[in-house]
Amino acid sequence: MVVYTLRRLIQMIPALLGIVVITFMISRVLPGDPAAMLGVSLLRQ
């Protein structure tokens, strides 16, 4: 069971890295400034 857990934890590293890279690339490709959009939505409240 320990070997299985370690194997799954090691497999999680590239998966998380891939998710971070994909999220970063999407945020760079989409138009607009996320910080400005967040500021506008906070001002409306």
Image (cartoon, rainbow, N blue to C red):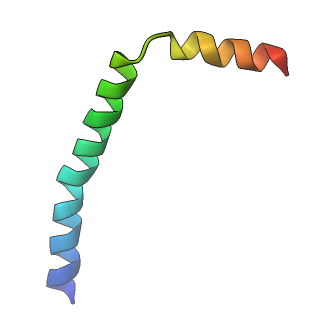
- Closest to the observer: 6 or 30? 30
Q: Residue at x 24, y 60 (%)?
A: 12
Image quadrant occupied by the N terminus: bottom left
Task: Estimate the x, y position of residue 11 in percent, counting from the top left.
Answer: 17, 63
At a point 23% along the width and 78% down the height, the residue shown is 5
- Residue 41 quadrant: top right
Q: Quadrant of residue 40?
A: top right
Q: Is residue 24 left or right of residue 35?
A: left
Q: Is residue 17 left or right of residue 29?
A: left
The residue that appears at 16% across and 63% down in the rendered structure is 10
Locate residue 7, reporting x and y percent: 15, 73
- Residue 36: image x %, image y %? 60, 9
The residue positioned farthest toward the bottom in the image shown: 1
* As drawn, 9 above or below 36: below
Q: Outermost residue, right direction?
A: 45
List x then y, in percent, for residue 25: 29, 25
In the image, is residue 16 above or below residue 12?
above
